Image (cartoon, helix red, strand yellow):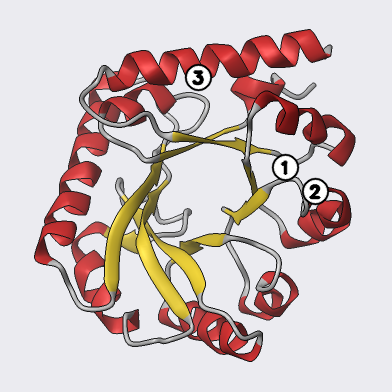
């Protein structure tokens, strides 16, 4: 892909996010999902105003980190094994996929050892898909209260991965339900829990996500094009 094509794709996504938000919500932050892409492919995004990228796999992130860490805020957005936390806790700006108490506690311990508090999002499961990570929808508030006392983490909001489906009405309902949960928890002002980020929406559904008030969208193929 040429630089011009990449820039055109980025601009198109931005324009669609602005149109979908329609003045009802702030335009969400665009996080470029960079898995499977080399540092050489990613670096031009910095000159296009992209400040945040999302990586799914720790090992892949570590190979690219020396070239990217001074140019971008890096979010860990994929499922994270506890034994990998120590490898990235000092280098990412946020972990978006916290969905268990043992993982939250490991992040807490490693962050304190590194002298920081790690911003995290709690991943929820809007559709209850067993094969995916995420706290069950109805257990979200209880889980947040369970991990809130951990001083090494800073709970900043929720993250959701929607199912792959062409049923736009179904997706619309899931986005609305997720936004409703976010608003209800935020309005309770629970101790140790800050509801300011709602990360939802990917290449296939970021317009719907923006229409329902996502504060972050995680977009890969709509920027880089499909692989293969």
SS of the residue at dot 3? helix
Which of the two discs, 2 and 1, labels the residue nearer the N terminus? 1
Between disc 1 and disc 3, the foreground one is 3
Q: CA distance from mark 2 to mark 1?
A: 13 Å
The residue indicated by pointer 2 is 68
The circle on residue 14 is: 3
Task: Write down the quadrant of residue 149 in the picture.
Answer: bottom left
SS of the residue at dot 1? loop
Q: CA distance from mark 3 to mark 2?
A: 22 Å
Q: Quadrant of the N terminus?
A: top right
Seen at 38% across and 21% down, the residue is 207
Q: Compared with residue 155, is residue 197 higher up or lower down, i.e. above or below? A: above
Which of the two discs, 3 and 2, labels the residue nearer the N terminus? 3
Name the spot of residue 189 as percent of width and height, x first: 15, 67
Is residue 118 shown left or right of residue 66? Answer: left
Contact, CB < 8 Å: mark 2 with mark 1? no
Q: Compared with residue 42, is residue 199 higher up or lower down, i.e. above or below? A: below
Name the spot of residue 5 as percent of width and height, x first: 74, 9
Seen at 52% across and 26% down, the residue is 203
The circle on residue 35 is: 1
């Amino acid at each position: 892909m040429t630089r011009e094509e990449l820039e055109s794709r980025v601009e198109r996504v931005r324009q669609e996010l602005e149109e979908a938000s329609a003045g009802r919500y702030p335009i969400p932050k665009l996080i470029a999902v960079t898995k499977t892409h080399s540092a050489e492919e990613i670096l031009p995004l910095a000159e296009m105003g992209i400040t945040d990228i999302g990586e799914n796999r720790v090992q892949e992130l570590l190979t690219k980190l020396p070239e990217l860490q001074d140019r971008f805020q890096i979010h860990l957005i994929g499922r994270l094994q506890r034994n990998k936390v120590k490898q990235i806790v000092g280098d990412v700006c946020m972990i978006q996929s916290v969905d268990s108490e043992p993982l939250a506690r490991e992040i807490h311990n490693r962050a304190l050892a590194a002298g920081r508090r790690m911003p995290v999002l709690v991943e929820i499961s809007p559709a209850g898909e067993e094969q995916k990570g995420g706290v069950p929808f109805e257990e979200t508030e209880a889980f947040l209260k369970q991990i809130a006392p951990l001083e090494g983490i800073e709970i900043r909001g929720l993250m959701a991965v929607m199912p792959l489906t062409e049923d736009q009405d179904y997706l619309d309902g899931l986005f609305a339900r997720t936004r409703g949960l976010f608003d209800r928890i935020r309005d309770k002002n629970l101790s140790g829990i800050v509801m300011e980020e709602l990360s939802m929406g990917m290449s296939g559904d970021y317009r719907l996500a923006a229409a329902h008030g996502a504060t972050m969208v995680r977009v890969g193929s709509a920027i880089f094009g499909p692989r293969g």
